[in-house]
Image (cartoon, helix red, strand yellow):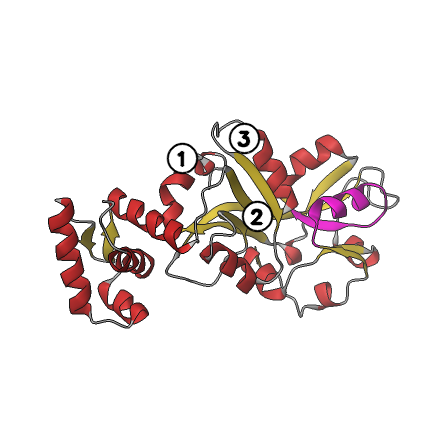
């Protein structure tokens, strides 16, 4: 395997990223016949096929991913490191902390703030500056695996001792109170929150008192003021265990669902699977 040259490694990498020979050939500006010839050479050299033909394209085996990782190391895209870099929202980091802090013995987890721009998030994944991105769905890219990870209905979060909101929440409460707004780009918000109507007066005419990209900061402000905010229900239990907060179901006119996705580079498929992240939430 050490005798495989960089050109062959590049072809294996392109096949994994594109999922088919035509896409890989186009990406590398070579002919499909060159792809086939290289695969035959590798089959002879290694004694086995690196890819299995399926209805959806070419399915790489474990050895193919090993060669892709080798290609990334040579090209400087996958510098060996002990840190497993994860970017996500503050509340998801809080949820994950209880589950995966002791699952990795040979690496430590490095959480970084998530970029607001979807294109920048995708770029960091493609260039392996980030190992795992957990957030709103990103544009489709052949080199990135994207799977639905967390699904929850949205609810209202208010101060436990709110001056006006006591035992129930209705549309008049929504209209009459100041709001805390999670600051993300519109594309990211709509990809995560189903049912949100940005142009609806219920949203566009709200009085916003504070904006932040940090959900924990907003939850803290909510806990010590009469501001209100919407938040995925899955986050409410840990928040209420730390802060004087209470939650309410959204009125029918405001019903929304939250969805986030797990994204990672195809070359990391086996490493990500070993983390057991899919066992944390039932989707």
At mark 2, the secondary structure is: strand
- Give the alpha-carbon distance from disc 2 to disc 3, as whole Å: 16 Å
Image coordinates of residue 14 in percent, x first then y, are 31, 60
The residue wearing badge 3 is 99
The residue wearing badge 2 is 87
- Give the alpha-carbon distance from disc 1 to disc 3, as whole Å: 13 Å
- Residues drawn in magenta: 213-231
Task: Tell me whether the residue at label 1 lies in contact with that at label 3, contact meaning CB atoms closer than 8 angstroms.
Answer: no
Please tell me which of labels 1 and 3 falls first in the chain. 3
Which numbered mark, 2 or 3, is in the foreground of this view? 2
Please tell me which of labels 1 and 2 falls first in the chain. 2
Pointer 3: residues within 10 angstroms few (<14), some, or many (20+)? few
Image coordinates of residue 109 in percent, x first then y, are 55, 37
User: Which quadrant holds residue 140?
Assistant: bottom left
- Give the alpha-carbon distance from disc 1 to disc 2, as whole Å: 18 Å
Q: Residue at x 81, y 62 (%)?
A: 207
227 magenta-colored: yes
Q: Residue at x 47, y 63 (%)?
A: 139
At mark 3, the secondary structure is: helix
The residue wearing badge 1 is 274
Pointer 1: residues within 10 angstroms few (<14), some, or many (20+)? few
Image coordinates of residue 12 in percent, x first then y, are 27, 56
Q: Is 58 left or right of 224, judged from the image as shown?
A: left
Q: Residue at x 75, y 38 (%)?
A: 246
- Residue in front for this viewpoint, 263 or 136: 263
177 magenta-colored: no
């Amino acid at each position: 395997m050490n005798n495989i040259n960089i050109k062959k490694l590049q072809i294996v990498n392109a096949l994994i990223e594109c999922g088919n020979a035509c896409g890989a050939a186009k990406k590398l500006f070579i002919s499909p016949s060159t792809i086939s010839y290289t695969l035959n050479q590798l089959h002879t050299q290694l004694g086995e096929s690196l890819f299995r033909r399926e209805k959806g394209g070419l399915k790489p085996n474990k050895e193919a991913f090993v060669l892709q990782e080798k290609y990334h190391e040579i090209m400087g895209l996958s510098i060996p490191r002990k840190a497993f870099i994860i970017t996500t929202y503050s509340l998801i980091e809080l949820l994950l902390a209880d589950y995966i802090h002791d699952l990795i013995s040979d690496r430590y987890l490095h959480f970084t703030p998530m970029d607001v721009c979807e294109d920048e998030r995708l770029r960091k994944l493609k260039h392996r500056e980030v190992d795992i991105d957990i957030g709103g769905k990103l544009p489709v890219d052949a080199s990135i695996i994207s799977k639905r990870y967390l699904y929850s209905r949205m609810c209202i979060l208010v101060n436990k001792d709110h001056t006006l909101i006591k035992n129930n929440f209705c549309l008049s409460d929504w209209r009459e109170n100041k709001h805390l707004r999670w600051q993300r780009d519109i594309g990211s918000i709509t990809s995560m929150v189903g049912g949100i109507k940005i142009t609806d007066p219920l949203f566009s005419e709200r009085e916003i008192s504070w904006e932040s990209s940090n959900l924990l900061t907003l939850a803290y402000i909510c806990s010590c003021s009469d501001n209100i905010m919407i938040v995925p229900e899955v986050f409410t239990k840990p928040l209420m265990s730390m802060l004087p907060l209470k939650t309410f179901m959204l009125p029918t006119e405001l019903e929304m669902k939250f969805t986030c996705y797990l994204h990672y580079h195809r070359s990391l498929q086996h490493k990500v699977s070993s983390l057991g992240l899919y066992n944390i939430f039932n989707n």
